[in-house]
Amino acid sequence: MKELIREEVRGMKRYVAGKPVSEVKRELGLTQVVKMASNENPWGASPRVKEAVVRTLSDISRYPDSGSFGLRAALMAKTGVPMEKIFAGCGSDSLIKVISATFLRPGEEILMGEHSFSRYEDNALLMGARVVKSPMPQGFLDLPDMLTRITDKTRIIYLCCPNNPTGSAFGKAQFEAFLLHVPERVVLVLDEAYREYVTREDYFEALDYLPDHPRLIVLRTFSKAYGMASLRVGYGFAQEELVEAFQKVMDPFLVNLFAQEAAVAALEDEDFLRHVQEENRKGKAYFYEELQALNLPYVPSEANFVLFDTGRDDLEVFQALLRKGYIVRPGSYLGLPGFLRVTISTMEDNRGFFEALRQVLEGVVSKNTQTRR
Ligand SMILES: *Cc1c(COP(=O)(O)O)cnc(C)c1O
């Protein structure tokens, strides 16, 4: 049987998603479980999104508009980017696949950060491409280092900003310096899945660079700040010629009707987005306070999650937290042993989490004390 499967597929790893609440409840016999593992929005989605979904039920038997016209028009109205340069897919996950299939020939290379979004790698491997990784000291993409790793084979560079799983982001000056040195034959994908959460003042508007950088592709999503992860809708901006190519590669009805209608409704509710941003900001400040009090080093975050070093076996801490009803993301699954990535949640859940973490840390031996013995 194995020979039937393409070598490229055999070389891929399966994506390990955050544990679902229902599974943890069932397995551990818990009634109260809080998921802070998948960077989902703890404030849900806008009431307008829910109304749109209900309203659309009457058309459940219809195919969706394959061109996502209404959604792209709404995105044009919001951003000023012409519709011909906008594309949408079934989550930005699906768009990463479309981009990989459009550009990557076997033996070519993608370039990405060492601790960045794993889907770039998996989709590159699927196309028979090689993956080149740049080290990320302190959890930050090292843009000058990335430039030194560009070869004749480099086809796509992925910049995840803010970066998942570290939460770090670079600013305008760094981005501009990088853009200046990316060769014409390389596609630059800027994945801004967490853009709405950025608080650093020197952040940039990526769309401003589209006219002068024809190989720049910007990806965004409704899954995080808009709270629509279940509906699966992501979108992007690129030159018309590239968008036309993507449209050929995409499955024709990639964005379902509910997702299209809901996304348009989400864009109309700016108050909801502001509320989410404000609450996330407060939660992040609280995370920093608690982590400092616990003496646990963390990566400053521009997203809705914080990556920190437990100084212990993260899988042990993860399991102990699970037993207390808190699902988080262990660093070992992300190539960052010792670390945990935790989604910023409501203040009630944040407080509960840190209470549980304090208790857990007392029980799990620190790596430092172990080595000293
Ligand atoms: C969550 C995430 C995505 C994908 O989100 P979709 O739900 O597929 O739109 C893309 N990139 C990064 C870095 C993410 O964290």
Image (cartoon, helix red, strand yellow):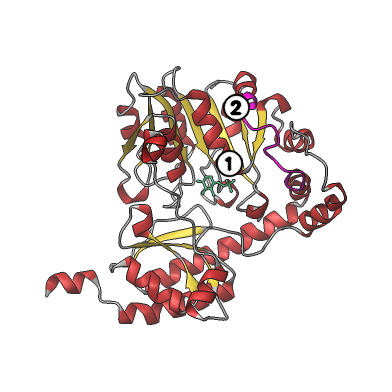
Q: Which mark is residue 92?
A: 1
Residue 218, position as x, y percentages in the image? 57, 34
Residue at image location 51% in from the left, 35% down from the top: 190
Residue 16 belongs to the span the image colors magenta: no
Ligand 1 within 8 Å, label 1 CB: yes
Q: Quadrant of the N terminus?
A: top left
Tell me: 60 left or right of 67.
right
Residue at image location 44% in from the left, 66% down from the top: 288
Q: Secondary structure at mark 1?
A: helix
Inter-mark Cα distance, 1 to 2: 15 Å
Tell me: 263 left or right of 325.
right
Answer above or below: position of 334 versus 61: below
Q: Secondary structure at mark 2?
A: helix
Q: Quadrant of the C terminus?
A: bottom left
Give the residue number, with chain letter if any, for mark 2: 249
Tell me: 161 left or right of 195.
left
Answer above or below: position of 307 versus 357: above
Residue 253 belongs to the span the image colors magenta: yes
Residue 130, position as x, y percentages in the image? 35, 31
Residue at image location 58% in from the left, 61% down from the top: 280
CA neighbours of label 2 inside 10 A, class few (<14), some (14 to 19), many (20+): some
Tell me: 190 left or right of 59.
left
- In this rendering, the count of numbered labels is 2
Is there any visible trace of residue 295 in the rendered image? Answer: no
* Amino acid beneath label 2: Val
Is there any visible trace of residue 173 in the rendered image? Answer: yes
Q: Which residue range is magenta in the image?
A: 246-259
Residue 3, position as x, y percentages in the image? 37, 36
* Amino acid beneath label 1: Ser
